[in-house]
Image: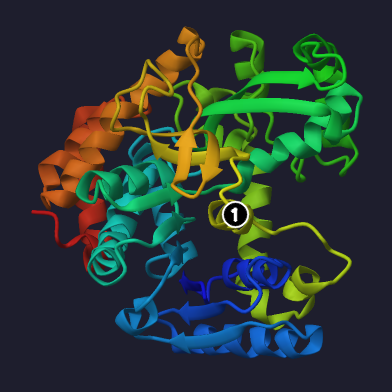
């Protein structure tokens, strides 16, 4: 019997979304779902709701829960992590807005830039603690991470625990499934595509028609301007509704000729010139709506009801199909996984965790290599390598100086004095979480 442990099971969307995917899986019939969270209230809510839908749907699974991580991990075959340290949005506001006061023009502040650093410095230590327990209690388990900042978390974990079966997962690739049928004027079932890069900083490399084998990029380029203008306008006359956030997106496509797989709020975090072209109104509007939705998640049953709707046959996240692929030794190709670079993108160091397609079998996930990765876009990715490596060094060695070096390596930081002042401010403001840096 498979035992799937959800670590951070009380998180909005994550816990119930994954549970609903397990409920739909015939391969996982009879499995044990073990819920773990340090928040007793949200853990209890998740268990009650999950059991309620289990009874309604007549699903054959066993659902358990505990605030004890060691108890949860005993006998685990699959572990799925999605945690957030502290009060997420209060800290996010600090990550985003305080650097702006020091003249550092960063976008969004979640995964890249100075905000991404401080987020990482909070998130990585507890995730390393989780992985240390996994390594001791259930070392053969496959471990999937959904927590951000994905690039830096995955690098730190795979550096400290190189033998752990650790895979980062992100749903951004689903944007291609939504957009390509319209751009290429055909059904998704007739499209083969591959994207690669770093998490939240990836581009569509290949798009082909299955029935003819023809390259889809010519028609993507032909339809690009009209499609994305319509995508923005059809949501609302106000350009800051979902579907906007296309300033950096459009500029990257214009300059580099490849379609990004995400929008400005993420793309803009990694590029030094992004602030000048980003759709800031759209980003702020998205953030405000996302924050309100997350904070009210358990207040409105409709927030999670759709996860368990029998008519909703798709999966909420891609991790359950991967688990099914491992158990069935299927050999299928998953569109995007985050794993250490083993020559998959030659311009990046081997220790950097890249986002590439992966072949799934009983051994886990093996990446797909791109021998001719575009060197121009690769040069942007390369700028992140030092930032990621110095962030890991800061955490593993509890080093304030390495955190400072991570700031200086970041392309959006252009003033060493202001960076030092910013770091001191953040270490004081977030001392509860960052006090380990000396």
Q: Residues within 10 Å of mark 1 (few under 14, many from 20)?
A: few
Give the quadrant of the C terminus.
Answer: bottom left
Name the residue located 44 percent from the left edge and 55 percent from the top edge. 145
Whole-percent x and y of residue 98?
37, 49
Q: In the rendered view, how is the structure colored? A: rainbow
Residue 149 visible, this orientation: no
Name the residue located 38 percent from the left edge and 62 percent from the top edge. 141
Specify whether 302 is left or right of 75: right
Whole-percent x and y of residue 107?
50, 37
Q: How many marks?
A: 1
Specify whether 38 is left or right of 371: left
What kind of element bears circle 1? loop
Specify whether 56 is left or right of 72: right
Whole-percent x and y of residue 409?
26, 27
Query: Vertically, is 154 above or below 202?
Result: below
Name the residue located 50 percent from the left edge and 18 percent from the top edge. 370
The residue labelled by disc 1 is 328
Q: Quadrant of residue 185?
A: top right
Q: Quadrant of residue 91?
A: bottom left
Residue 260 visible, this orientation: yes
Query: Vertically, is 143 above or below 53?
Result: above
Query: Vertically, is 414 above or below 92?
Result: above
Whole-percent x and y of residue 326?
53, 53
Query: Which residue is more in the foreground, 28 or 18?
Result: 28
Query: Which residue is more in the foreground, 6 or 59?
Result: 59
Taking the view exactly as shown, the residue that stands out farthest to the left is 438
């Amino acid at each position: 019997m498979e035992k799937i442990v959800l670590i951070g099971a009380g998180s909005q969307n994550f816990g119930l979304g994954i549970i609903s995917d397990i409920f739909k899986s015939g391969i996982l019939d009879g499995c044990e779902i073990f819920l773990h969270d340090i928040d007793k209230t949200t853990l209890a809510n998740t268990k009650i709701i999950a059991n309620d839908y289990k009874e309604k749907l007549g699903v054959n699974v066993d659902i358990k829960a505990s605030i004890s991580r060691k108890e949860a991990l005993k006998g685990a075959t699959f572990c799925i992590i999605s945690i957030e340290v502290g009060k997420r949005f209060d800290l996010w506001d600090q990550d985003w807005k305080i650097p702006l006061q020091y003249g550092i023009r960063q976008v969004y502040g979640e995964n890249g830039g100075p905000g991404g650093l401080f987020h990482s410095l909070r998130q990585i230590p507890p995730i390393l603690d989780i992985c240390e327990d996994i390594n001791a209690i259930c070392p053969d388990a496959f471990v999937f991470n959904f927590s951000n900042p994905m690039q830096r978390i995955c690098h730190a974990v795979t550096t400290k625990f190189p033998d752990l079966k650790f895979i980062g997962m992100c749903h951004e690739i689903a944007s291609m499934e939504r957009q390509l049928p319209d751009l290429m004027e055909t059904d998704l079932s007739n499209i083969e595509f591959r994207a690669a890069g770093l998490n939240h900083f990836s581009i569509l490399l290949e798009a082909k028609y299955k029935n003819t084998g023809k390259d889809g990029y010519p028609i993507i380029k032909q339809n690009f301007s009209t499609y994305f203008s319509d995508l923005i306008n059809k949501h609302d006359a106000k350009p800051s509704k979902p579907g906007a956030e296309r300033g950096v997106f459009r500029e990257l496509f214009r300059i580099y000729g490849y379609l990004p797989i995400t929008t400005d709020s993420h793309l803009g975090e990694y590029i030094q010139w992004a602030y000048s072209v980003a759709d800031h109104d759209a980003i702020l509007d998205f953030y405000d709506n996302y924050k309100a939705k997350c904070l009210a998640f358990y207040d409105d049953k409709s927030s999670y009801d759709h996860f368990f709707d029998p008519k909703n046959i798709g999966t909420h996240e891609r991790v359950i199909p991967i688990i099914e692929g491992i158990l069935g030794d299927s050999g299928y190709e998953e569109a995007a996984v985050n794993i250490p670079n083993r020559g998959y993108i030659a311009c990046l160091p081997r220790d950097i965790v890249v986002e590439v397609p992966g072949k799934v079998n009983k051994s886990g996930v093996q990446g797909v290599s791109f021998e001719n990765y575009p060197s121009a876009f690769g040069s942007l990715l390369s700028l992140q390598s030092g930032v990621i490596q110095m962030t890991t060094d800061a955490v593993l060695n509890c080093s304030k100086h390495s955190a400072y070096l991570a700031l200086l390596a970041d392309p959006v930081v252009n003033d060493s004095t202001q960076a030092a002042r910013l770091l001191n401010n953040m270490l004081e403001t977030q001392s509860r979480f960052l006090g380990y840096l000396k």
